[in-house]
Image (tube, rainbow, N blue to C red):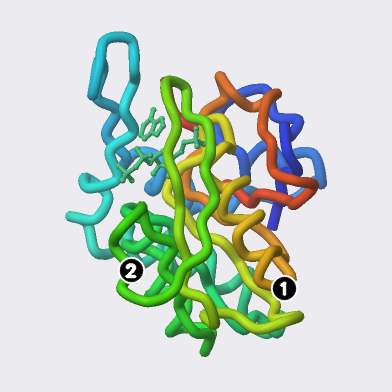
Amino acid sequence: MGQQEKSGETGGGNMEEAAAKENGRAADPRLQGISDAIRVVPHFPKPGIMFNDITALLLRPGVFKDAVDMFVERYRGMGIAAVAGIEARGFVFGPAIALAIGAKFIPLRKPGKLPGEVISETYVLEYGTDCLEMHVGATEQGERVVVVDDLVATGGTLSAAIRLLERAGADVVECACLIGLPKFKDFYKLNGKPVYILVESRK
Ligand SMILES: O=P(O)(O)OC[C@H]1O[C@H](OP(=O)(O)OP(=O)(O)O)[C@H](O)[C@@H]1O
Ligand SMILES: Nc1ncnc2[nH]cnc12
């Protein structure tokens, strides 16, 4: 399995495929199907944004399963105690991965959604700011955690998730995303943590 650290060194196309080529391995045949199943919608939610829509992939159970399986194969047997999913699209993949590897699932939510005591991290988006919250006590000192989301663009969201988990004492092993946006790949800010990406955005 290829692992992209921060910017990665791929020249476009599929991230796993590029990593496989670098290491003289054959790319996993499931990756093309995953890439093809992601719908790219121009100018959503605003002009100039090429939106990567994972809902198209979710309508194809075989491809959805392939994506989950690839993460499960990577993290099974690694002593992962928790999968932390980022609202909203990290909630689609995170619980399935957590159940399959026998880990707990920790929801990292947008502000004001969790009823108990929370810790918060604010982060900068392309335009404006946002915030993630986690219940106090969701993770314990030294627990090995993987953070899951659908897509990394600037890395701001994943960085906030890492800070939140580390403040609670967790050992963040890796971040895992289906999609990476090449436009931002030199600018990932992931607090020194690796990000594992299956496919690069097609446009
Ligand atoms: O790498 P970044 O630049 O931080 O962007 C990536 C984040 O953007 C999207 O979520 P969004 O904030 O649109 O929220 P949503 O899932 O609730 O729609 C995506 O699901 C990631 O969480
Ligand atoms: N291009 C994009 N597609 C889907 N989600 C995103 N979040 C940030 N940029 C995105």
Count of residue discs: 2
Q: Amino acid at mark 2?
A: Leu
Q: Which residue is mark 2?
A: 114
Residue farthest to the left, as pictured? 59
Q: Are marks 2 and 1 in contact (CB under 8 Å)?
A: no
Q: Secondary structure at mark 1?
A: loop
Res. 20 visible in picture: no
Q: Which of the numbered marks, if any, corresponds to residue 169? A: 1
Measured from the top left, where is residue 81 in percent x and y? 62, 84
Residue 52 figure quarter:
top left
Q: Which of the numbered marks, if any, corresponds to residue 198? A: none
Q: Residue at x 69, y 81 (%)?
A: 143
Measured from the top left, where is residue 61 in percent x and y? 24, 64
Res. 155 visible in picture: yes
Q: Is residue 65 left or right of residue 42?
A: right
Residue 59 figure quarter:
bottom left
